[in-house]
Amino acid sequence: MGSDPTTQDERFQHHILQGVSRTFALTIPQLPAALYRAVANAYLLCRIADTIEDDAELAFADKQRYSEQFIAIVEGRADAAPFAAELAPRLAPHATAAERELIAGTAAVVRITHALNPTQQAAMARCVRIMAEGMVHYQDQETLDGVADQAAMDRYCYYVAGVVGEMLTTLFCDHCPSLAARETEMMHLAVSFGQGLQMTNILKDVWDDRERGACWLPRDIFAQRGVRLSEVAPGRGGAGFEEAFGQLIATAHGHLRNALRYTLMLPADEPGIRRFCLWALGMAVLTLRKLNRHRDFANGSEVKISRRAVKATILTTNLLVRSDRALEALFGLASAGLPQSRISTPLASVADIAGSRVAP
């Protein structure tokens, strides 16, 4: 007799999570068991949407079609098998073996989605729809000239990360009913948390993105300093580029301060959820520090944090996870020297962003 199909799906989910992400394969298992299952599944759904968007050899029309098919699958309106059978062999050569396996196993991932409770399913379906539609929209706008301004960068960050923060907040509040009174404030801070992480990644990956013809930096703040993004060579941006880059570091730093506020709103008696947030936050702050010290870097490897730094982040936050005051002090120490920018009301018009198709 074969093993139970549900057990097979769970095993696949655990296995493929290790293959498609090192960071989240580390942080998601810190969550309580019930949340681990849902958040791991949500991550894989987002990763499928992201794999479609990232494929360099799929035409825009195909990306749009596959994204629409995937939305329908998650919402229970279409079968995953034909989608997976058609898309998996079409992925570009740069796709990893794990990404191909993930796409091929879409049905297993979605079976777990459809076995979750209604609140979890609704949150995940909303996230996938907004993310997939938003990413495809921005894919059609890729250029080395960057996006128009900070507002356009905010919208992009919302589509790829802020909406994930909203989904996670719904999952956390479903798990911890005591958070219900804080849910509205947490939703705004969650968008800011997502933007802080995404901006850090955009800054770190700026030259890698450039190689594939994309730039997500706001061109207006560079143009104000006489810098044309499409003409900048890696590591040779000059004083104007580095000054504008520092302004973006300050903005990301402000969002990460909101991320700390968000994390400290989580119950101290839920250390697993706090660790999940703190590890991501800590690694982002350390990355910003390296970016700030090396604004003239020419390759992402130059600003990648060391394994020792990751281990130190894990050890320190584990020791202090229940103490708000100690965590605030630790954040202050880790972020010392970073340029400041206060983000008081993160993306107040989230509903407008989610419901509109504003060109960058």
Image (spheres, rainbow, N blue to C red):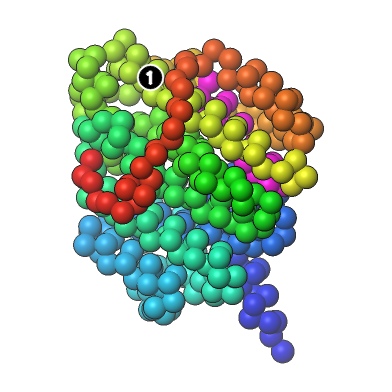
Where residue 341 sits in the image (x, y, percent)?
44, 20
Q: Residue at x 33, y 18 (%)?
A: 244
Where residue 179 sits in the image (x, y, percent)?
64, 49
Where residue 224 sits in the image (x, y, percent)?
22, 17
Indicate whether 133 appears above or below 209: below
Between residue 32 and residue 63, name the one nearer to us: 32
Indicate whether 310 appears above or below 244: below
Q: Does the magenta stretch include residue 236?
A: no
Q: Which residue is drawn at 56% across and 64% down?
A: 120
| Horizontal relation, residue 346 to residue 154: left or right | right
> Which quarter of the figure has residue 88?
bottom left
Indicate whether 104 appears above or below 219: below
Q: Residue at x 57, y 26 (%)?
A: 286
* Residues in magenta, as a range: 271-289
- Residue placed under numbered mark 1 in the picture: 247
Q: Residue at x 52, y 21 (%)?
A: 290
Q: Which residue lies furthest to the front in this view?
A: 181
The answer to whether residue 12 shows anywhere in this view is yes
Query: In the rendered structure, which amino acid carries the disc numbered 1?
Result: Gln
Quarter of the image with the C terminus is: top left
Q: Does the magenta stretch include residue 275?
A: yes
Quarter of the image with the N terminus is: bottom right
Between residue 273 and residue 63, name the one nearer to us: 273
Between residue 3 and residue 360, name the one nearer to us: 360
Indicate whether 105 appears above or below 179: below
How dense is the environment of label 1, judged by Cα within 10 Å: few (below 14), some, or many (20 and up)? some
The answer to whether residue 135 shows anywhere in this view is no
